[in-house]
Image (cartoon, rainbow, N blue to C red):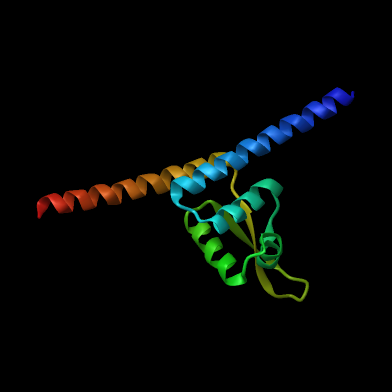
Amino acid sequence: MWYFRLHGKVNAMRVKERELSSIAEISDFLGISATGRKILSLLVRTKKRFSVPEIIARTKRSERSIRAHLKALSKLKLIRREMAITRKGRLAYRYFVLRASDLVKSVRKETLGRLRKLEARAMGARER
C-alpha cells in the first residue's frame, strides 16, 4: 500500500518538474522576464487562482510590477483571469494558468504571429 502512495507522489513530482521545465522554456522562448516567470511558476505549481495581493505576497514583487506582468502574460494568453467579488463587495480578479495543451497553443499562435511580422518586414525591406 505504501508503495502506491509513494509511487503516486513521485509521479506527481515528475509532472510538476516537467511543467516547470516547460515554463522555463516558454519564458526563454517568448522573452518573459524573471518576474513573469515567477508568476507563471507560482500558478503552475499550485494550480490555484490568485488575486493580485496574493501574488504580491508570494512573489515579493511590487504591485506595479505584478500588474504589468499579469497584463503581458494575459496578452500572450498564457494566463487568464476571472472576476470575483471580495468580502467587502468589491470587484477583483483572480488569475490562473491554462492547461498545458492550451499553453502550447498560445505559444504556437504567438510564435507564428511574430514570424509573420518578421516576414512582412523582410518583404518590405526587399522592395526598397
Q: Which image quadrant: the C terminus?
A: bottom left
Q: In which quarter of the image is residue 87?
A: bottom right
Looking at the image, which residue sits at the far left?
A: 128
Picture residue at 39% right of the left edge, 45% below the top = 111
Q: Which image quadrant: the N terminus?
A: top right
Q: In this view, does 119 lie above or below 60?
A: above
Q: Nearer the viewer, residue 56 or 120?
A: 56
Instruction: Where is residue 42? Give x, y as percent.
Output: 66, 52
Picture residue at 23% right of the left edge, 50% below the top = 120
Instruction: Where is residue 76? Give x, y as percent.
Output: 47, 54
Q: Is residue 109 above or below residue 63?
A: above
Picture residue at 66% right of the left edge, 60% below the top = 59
Please state if 1 lies on the left or on the right of 68 as rendered.
right
Please state if 113 lies on the left or on the right of 76 as rendered.
left
Please state if 11 lies on the left or on the right of 31 as rendered.
right
Please state if 91 lies on the left or on the right of 108 as rendered.
right
Picture residue at 70% right of the left edge, 52% below the top = 48
Q: Which of 86 and 3 is in front in this view?
A: 3
User: How many circles with numbers are drawn on the protein?
Assistant: 0
Q: In this view, does 34 lie above or below 106?
A: below
Instruction: Where is residue 32? Give x, y as percent.
Output: 49, 54
Instruction: Where is residue 40? Give x, y as percent.
Output: 60, 52
